[in-house]
Image (spheres, rainbow, N blue to C red):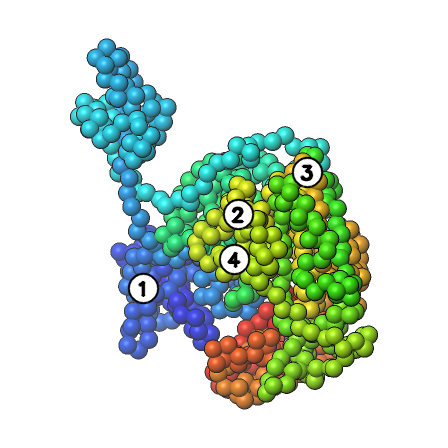
Amino acid sequence: MYANVIIDIMHEKLDRTFQYEVPRELEGKLCPGMQVSFPFGNGDRQRKGYVLELTEEPQWDPSKIKKLSGIAKKGIAAEGELIALACWLKEAYGCTMIQALHTVLPVRDRVQGGEKVYVRLAGDTCKVDSYLALCGKRGYRARARLIRRLKDCPEGLDTGRLSSEGTAGMPVIRALEQLGIVRCERREAFRRPEVSKNPEYGRKELNEEQQAAVEAIWENGAAAGREGKEPPVALLYGVTGSGKTEVYLELIRRTMEEGRQAIVLIPEIAMTYQTLTRFYTRFGDQVSVMNSRMSAGERYDQFERARRGEIRVVIGPRSALFTPFDRLGLIIVDEEHEGAYKSEQMPRYHARDVAIRRAGMCGAAVVLGSATPSVDSYWHAERGDYKLVRLPHRAGAGQLPRVYVEDMRRELREGNRSVFSARLRGQMEACLQRREQAMLFLNRRGYSGVLSCRSCGEAVKCPHCVVALAVQRAGGQRHLVRHHCGDVREAPKTCPSCGSRYLSELRAGTQQIESLVRAEFPGARVLRMDMDTTRNKHDHERILSAFAAGEADILVGTQMIVKGHDFKNVTLVGVLAADMSLGAGDYRACERTFQLLTQAAGRAGRGERAGEVTIQTYQPEHYSIRLAAAQDYEGFYEREIAYRSLLRYPPCGHMLAVLASCREEEHLRRAVGYLKEMAERICAGQGVQVIGPAQSGIYRVKDVYRRNLFLKGGSLEQLAGVRRKLEKYIGANQGFDSVQIQFDPDPMQAL
């Protein structure tokens, strides 16, 4: 027997399988996915790797094939399905096989856990009942209490729990063990996330719209399964507060009744607190969580519990997608529009696409949910690739909030230089008087020093790409740079749109806003939530639970506070500098701005009280802001898809980003120049445009320089063919040995 293994080293030249003989003592013990050790190279240095295949056919002279040393002591076997998924990732995203394996195996090493002593009833039922009656006669109340408790839990209870709840201590347990009434046994103790149940999230009756959505999604999955088509994908498009989570819960309940498992993806750790509480209240210990803030031991334990079938629902960001479920029946991608689902490391996969691929491998269904679907997903739904299911109204008594758009240009002309408009300041005073809560959202996503006019609100844009130019300073001079096409120009003295001299870089941070709020409203209790205040493991939960409990009046934060949270007492949301993300220098800037503003507005008025939203902007006439205020997704989609179609941006066209980095700036410049020449020869006559090369948005990081090349047009398959030819060209030229090259299909932004 021979094993084809891949060495656990991330180097392109080792991105192939090596064959080893399986020793007799390992025959029958090995399976694909196991981590093994083996001698490698001329010096027979011991290395680790993964078994991809077992075969009886030697690829070389058997006398020259080395033997495996053994199974890695801390290795975890991958499921065959996950190995197949890794192979697909390698082909689809141009990464190495070991990079793909590290992606699908988020937990690779065993982490030793503890043990607990469990107590359960022993002997026959008659003996136990007879002794229980005897305890009543002799007044053995503690022994009787323990026996009754264990009769309710035949699987047993750990001694620590019995002691903490006051049922019985160790002397009582030992006495009953000596009499043969109970039996003690040691079991491996898994670390579990601490989650409390909330009665508010108990099972609710679905309204007519929610019930219809459940039936439509369920029937779509069943019909597709019978016909053997591609994995059934449903896009659940529901306004904020429409009760999408209740639809998810019902779909999961039905999936579990069929004996299958479910994965629920959320875009950010900040959303874990409320989501996990809701699901845990409904399904108890069958639910767990996976995220990067957990310790290695906690992640290993959840991984192992899933493998053993002890949990049936896993919630978490991208990595939760690779939970080793063997009967996966449903994958839910909540807030599917979020850019956090796109990996920034190789392989640069999108969780939505990988979810659909994994669902197709195991016969599962996929549900994509959002109040502001990505343009890509809605385009697929319009084409019939996805089943479109709508929830057009809020659930219960809640109504969509009233939205005001405040023109900060007018505020400036009227002498108000504060960060708060007159309307927002008045609303905050009234909100505090009514003892209600407010959220202030600073829209800083994608902000990179854009030059904006405070008279007309327009950002200075690149004439070639119709996106904003970023500000760069060098030698005391201010220049404008377009990182997509490489355009560089001197910063203008006056606004190209209106001629005004009031050009400035808007700079504000959440800490500054928090200080201003405390100064304006000294009696208000203020919390801030951003990257600085959520560095530790439980910071997200601490801040959100405090705000939910009414321990603060105002929550100030970045985009992490406006995603999926449900606070019944929030009646006011203020959006500061709403147009800031329009200057992100990215073809998706308008889409992200619309989504952020719509999601922010959706946090207000989710309870019985009516909500208000004030959006402060220097561009009130911009379609993304105007349509977000009107909660008009369809109107926005029509405008945005026309723009994408005109310029052949995804989903109407496709792109491939070639990301290069090197410690030597001049060597990098020459290498990317050669790559461009080769790309142009490959793409000649194929209708694929080669753009660049250009400096990356952050040109140097830790003394490593970065440059990008973009290919636009054609199909993904066509671009994948170009990528493979470029990979061969790179591998055949030693000049690229010191240059790191990454490929990113359909990048989320112009990097």
| Pointer 2 residue | 544
Q: Residues within 10 Å of mark 2 (few under 14, many from 20)?
A: many
Hey, what amino acid is under mark 1? Ser
Structural crowding at the residue carrying mark 1, measured as other residues with C-alpha within 10 Å and reported as few (<14), some (14–19) or many (≥20)? many
Q: Residues within 10 Å of mark 4 (few under 14, many from 20)?
A: many
Residue under label 3, please give it: 609
Mark 2 and mark 4: Cα distance apart in space: 36 Å
Residue 640 horizontal/vertical position (percent): 76, 61
- The one nearer the camera, 418 or 527, is 418
Residue drawn at (63%, 85%), measured in percent from left and top? 477
* Residue 658 placement (x, y as % from top left): 59, 75
Judging depth in this view, the residue of 576 and 160 nearest the camera is 576
Q: Taking 332 as reference, is 577 left or right?
A: right
The outermost residue toward the top is 137
Tell me if 19 is positioned left or right of 340 in this view: left
Residue at point 55%, 42% (across, down): 550
Residue 174 drawn at (x, y percent): 19, 28
Q: CA distance from mark 1 to mark 3?
A: 63 Å
Dot 2: what SS?
helix
Q: Is residue 666 above or below residue 169?
A: below
Task: Identify the element where label 4 is drawn.
Answer: helix
Numbered tag placed on residue 37 in the rendering: 1
In the picture of the structure, the residue carrying the numbered disc 4 is: 85
Three-letter code for the amino acid on which mark 3 is drawn: Arg
Residue 495, above or below 170 = below
- Label 3 environment density (alpha carbons within 10 Å; few <14, some 14–19, many ≥20): some
Residues under labels 3 and 2: Cα distance? Answer: 20 Å
| Dot placed on the residue nearer the N-terminal end, 2 or 1 | 1
Report how far apart the C-alphas of labels 3 and 4 lie in the structure. Answer: 48 Å
